[in-house]
Image (spheres, grey):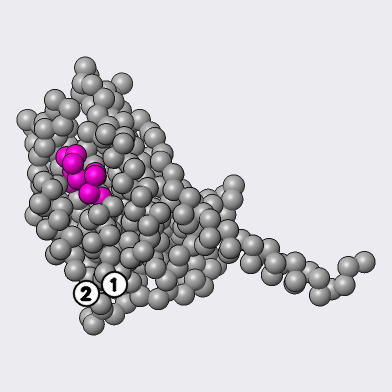
Amino acid sequence: MRPLYSVPLGIAATGAACLAYSAGYEVRSFRLRRIDVPVLPKGARPVRVLQVSDIHMVSGQEKKQRWLKSLAGLRPDLVVNTGDNLSDPLGVPATLDALGPLMDFPGVYVFGSNDYYGPARKNPARYLSAMRSGIHGLNNPDGTGKRGITGAVHNPWEKLRDGFDAAGWLDLTNRRGRLPIGGLDIEFTGLDDPHIRRDRYAEVAGGPSADADLSLAVVHAPYLRVLDAFTADRYPLILAGHTHGGQLCVPFYGALVTNCDLDAKRVKGLSTHQAGGRRSHLHVSAGCGTNRYTPVRFACPPEATLLTLVAAR
């Protein structure tokens, strides 16, 4: 018979092994997912859209920089950056360097809360608390999504914006814009980050323009109020990030939390959203980084996604 003390020792050893795997291997095990989305007009040729999200760049993350640079080899028709590029006030040069090859292609972007503010230390027990109480989101009761924004470390997001703008990427923070992509006139409607209540839907409301070949909605955090508004306004595809795919997931079960009010079943990948009697495709990227104070992933590897937009059936 095993001594009783061997049981807690075995549990501790298993936990240590999981932590070493999630922090030492999986968090740097970058993946590319490929999916088709049927949203184009009949007869249109496919459009390849590369979505990058939640990079959370910290100075010195050379492997992540090399991987992001390598994505330019996909030669996408369009790059969509759904925010949270930074996790370090000193990370702007590394971020612009990593995304430099991708900025040779047409692109659009929105920002997330971590682009504006430096990250705060987070207690991993919040994940367990959310699981015990049966909630899927970790948003604060006041809806700000961050405690103590007043006095938070300011990230130099302006330099990031200037770099993206200089490359010709469209700023979609509470804005609309259009680009010719693959022979199509594609319209974009974007919002600033709902996680910290910077979204202003009234400024971009009205739905797709009648003369656009395709209209896409872009936002960082997929809060239901935003998804409802985009869907009711007849956007066929909404692109978002923010959730990290749950970040710490249970094998064969999935995510426990989403860090917003989206249900855990749609924490990453392609799904649908219904509101106002209408339905939209929703793609949520699990992102390729983590908050610098919680640099772990488990059963949820970092990713970017190549979405091939094809003709609707």
Amino acid beneath label 2 = His
**CA distance separating discs 1 and 2:** 6 Å
Is residue 25 shown to the viewer in this render? yes
Identify the secondary structure beneath mark 1. loop
Depth check: 77 or 121 in front? 77
Q: Are marks 1 and 2 in contact (CB under 8 Å)?
A: yes
Q: Residue furthest left?
A: 211
Asked if 286 appears above or below 160 in the picture, the reply is: above
Position of residue 311 measured from the top left corner of the image (x, y, whole percent) = 27, 23
Asked if 188 appears above or below 60 in the picture, the reply is: above
Which quadrant of the figure has residue 274?
Answer: top left
Label 2 crowd bin: few (<14), some (14–19), many (20+), radius 10 Å: some
Q: Closer to the N terminus: mark 1 or mark 2?
A: 1
**Picture residue at 48% right of the left edge, 50% below the top:** 29
**Region rendered in magenta:** 99-108
Label 1 crowd bin: few (<14), some (14–19), many (20+), radius 10 Å: many
**Picture residue at 31% right of the left edge, 31% below the top:** 308
Which quadrant of the figure has residue 179?
Answer: top left
Q: Does the magenta portion include 293?
A: no
Provide the residue designation for mark 2.
154
Q: Residue furthest bottom?
A: 151
**Picture residue at 15% right of the left edge, 42% below the top:** 188
Q: Does the magenta portion include 103?
A: yes
Residue 118 disc label: 1
Depth check: 178 or 71 in front? 71
Residue 27 disc label: none
Identify the secondary structure beneath mark 2. loop
Position of residue 157 measured from the top left corner of the image (x, y, whole percent) = 18, 65
Amino acid beneath label 1 = Gly
